[in-house]
Amino acid sequence: MNKFTIYIFVLLLIILPGLPTANHYSQVEATKASVYDFRLNTHKSNQIDSFTKQLAIKNKYIEDGWSLVWQDEFNQKQLDPDLWNIENWAAQKNNELQFYTPDNIKVSDGKLQLISKKQRYKGRSYTSAAIHSKDKFYFQYGKVEMRAKLPSGQGIFPAFWMMPNIDNTWLPEIDIMEMLGHKPNEIWMVQHWLNEDQQLKSNADHFVGDDYSQDYHTFSIEWKPGSITWLIDDKERFQSTQSIPQEDMYLYLNTAIGGDWPGSPDDTTVFPQVFEVDYIRVYQQKGANQ
């Protein structure tokens, strides 16, 4: 055996064990199939979870005759422009101190954040955020529900409310939830309207419970032709049968800073503050306006 033959023989001994076998190829294909099957099953699982969650939301109040007609779960990367308008102005009512800016709105991890800051901006000492559904979603009668964790502190004034879907008109008004930040365990439920003499009238009550800035809670109304019922965490807390609005109304969500009612922030107020919303949903009953 010459040297060249010996060289080739040794080289084959080195290479052959490392060459892929039929069994090797089958293992590779099995691995690919497993990865594909895992991805497929994961995708199916996510679809099933999403479908199950949506079905639960849809059926939540079905026994009481409510059908889901509108919702925002805030699962997008930004606020849905088909559902909401964003305020960009210096509030001109109640002597409030904030400038509402789009920059103070964040959507992430399935939550909407309305952020309030101590920040000089266009002549104001504070910035905050406000959104509303005027001309994009409005309705007559229904069950409105928000799950949220509220901001707190002296001068902080979060609110979730409704107004008529008419330009330059703010009455009648339904305040689903208002909270003065220095009393984070007290929720106000308020209704405003003008009487026949064009005088402002109000009907209101408040409920003292948990610290609503520490965890998520639900705030709801059931608006019917003859009544408005306020609920906190699914428990009825107030009802009005006076001057019930009969027109289409839209949703408004904001955090004001300062003003006549809450007063101004002071040295105890911590910034930034966040009004964090998990979801907003609207249900209606068939024939409710008949």
Image (tube, rainbow, N blue to C red):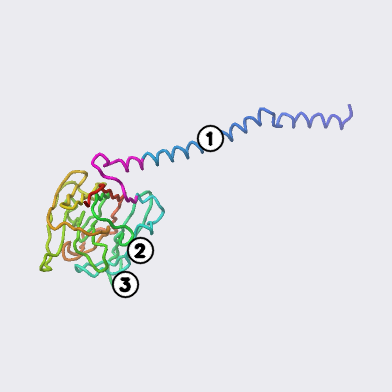
Q: How many marks?
A: 3
Across and down, in percent, residue 92 comes to 24, 70
Q: Earlier in the sequence, mark 3 or mark 1?
A: 1
Q: Residue at x 23, y 61 (%)?
A: 163
Across and down, in percent, residue 86 comes to 34, 63
Q: Earlier in the sequence, mark 3 or mark 2?
A: 2
- Residue 70 part of the magenta-drawn span: yes
As measured in the structure, the alpha-carbon distance from the residue carrying label 2 to the one carrying label 1 is 43 Å
- What's the residue type where badge 3 is placed? Lys
- What's the residue type where badge 1 is placed? Asp
Neighbor class of circle 2 (other Cα within 10 Å; few <14, some 14-19, many 20+) is some
Across and down, in percent, residue 33 comes to 57, 34
**Secondary structure state at the residue bearing disc 2:** helix
Q: Identify the residue under disc 2.
A: 102
Neighbor class of circle 3 (other Cα within 10 Å; few <14, some 14-19, many 20+) is few
- Residue 198 part of the magenta-drawn span: no
Picture layout, residue 15 above or below residue 72: above
User: What range of the chain is rendered magenta?
Assistant: 53-72
Picture layout, residue 149 above or below residue 156: above
The circle drawn on residue 105 is none
Q: Identify the residue under disc 3.
A: 122
- What's the residue type where badge 2 is placed? Pro
As measured in the structure, the alpha-carbon distance from the residue carrying label 3 to the one carrying label 2 is 14 Å
**Secondary structure state at the residue bearing disc 3:** loop
Q: Residue at x 59, y 31 (%)?
A: 30
As measured in the structure, the alpha-carbon distance from the residue carrying label 3 to the one carrying label 1 is 56 Å
Q: Identify the residue under disc 1.
A: 37
In front: label 2 or label 1 = 1
Picture layout, residue 260 above or below residue 15: below
In front: label 3 or label 2 = 2
